[in-house]
Amino acid sequence: MSLFAGARSVLFVHAHPDDETLATGALIAWLVAQGVTCRVLTATRGERGELVAGRFPDGLAGEDFVARRTIELAGALRELDAGEPEFLGEGRARAAGRPPRRYQDSGMRWVREGLAGPAEDSGPDSLTAADAAEAVADLVAAITAAAPDLVVTYDAAGGYGHPDHIRVHELSQRACAEAGVPLLELISDPDAPGEWHDLADQQPVVAAALEHHQTQLTVDGRDVVHSGGQRVPMQLRIGVRPSA
């Protein structure tokens, strides 16, 4: 029996705008097509993302860049039929009695091809520098408000090692245990055991959603070309397993 059997609602927890589509767009589209309500909670606004060269002649920086990434996220979620953007630390994703706060992108550096590591200059407001208990409380508030049957996020490897992805995995484990909601993790290793879904038929929806993330990537057929020039196939085979 599928790990999603009987689920009526699923909450996806991601680190930055575009992760929801790059990592799980096909899975979201597949679930929605089956009548499952899917929502996405994003931990940061991707403040430290790179900009696709030449696409914005006047450039984008600071709050203009943040605003643009938020608009892109909203467009992608519309394509996926996954609600409106919600960010950790705000609205129903903020623990009661606390003023809103913004968890910021921690940044990263490439350790080797395909593997990221911590940046050397993460700021004090970054997600990885935030008090874990505070962030978990915010995530518990979000889970409680959304009342999903399942939560989905990264595995301990964070997909490709981004420190914010790894942090979101750790926070999700603690928050789901506290909220009493099962957590499924996305499998990083394509050869690892788990429940694998081949979702090539969802490619048109994924492509349409990715097209909104103009600051970060270019869609070229079934490939994605990232702002740094890396070309990778769209993620249309997705594996999940219960988080340990």
Image: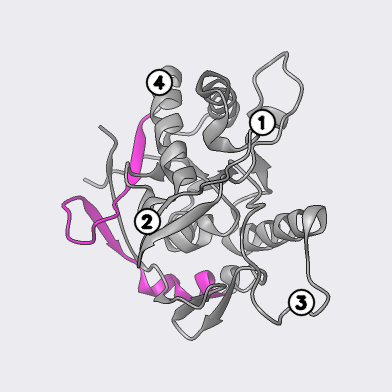
What separation in Å lies between label 4 and label 1 (alpha carbons)?
20 Å
Label whose residue precedes the other's in the sequence (3 or 4) = 3
What separation in Å lies between label 2 and label 3 (alpha carbons)?
27 Å
Label whose residue precedes the other's in the sequence (3 or 1) = 3
Tag 3 near tag 1, CB within 8 Å:
no
Tag 2 near tag 4, CB within 8 Å:
no
Element class at badge 4:
loop
The residue labelled by disc 3 is 56
Residue appearing at x 40%, y 40% in the figure = 7
What separation in Å lies between label 2 and label 4 (alpha carbons)?
28 Å
Assign the N terminus to one quadrant of the image.
top left
Label whose residue precedes the other's in the sequence (4 or 1) = 1
Tag 3 near tag 4, CB within 8 Å:
no
Above or below for 146 versus 20: above
Label whose residue precedes the other's in the sequence (1 or 2) = 1
Q: Position of residue 223 (x, y in %)?
A: 44, 80
Q: Could you classify mark 3 by the number of other residues whose Cα lies within 10 Å: few (under 14), some (14-19), or many (20 or more)?
A: few
The residue labelled by disc 1 is 89
The residue range painted magenta reads 182-207
Residue 82 appears in the figure = yes
The residue labelled by disc 2 is 160
Label whose residue precedes the other's in the sequence (2 or 3) = 3
Residue appearing at x 55%, y 28% in the figure = 139
Q: Could you classify mark 2 by the number of other residues whose Cα lies within 10 Å: few (under 14), some (14-19), or many (20 or more)?
A: some
Assign the C terminus to one quadrant of the image.
top left
Above or below for 220 versus 166: below
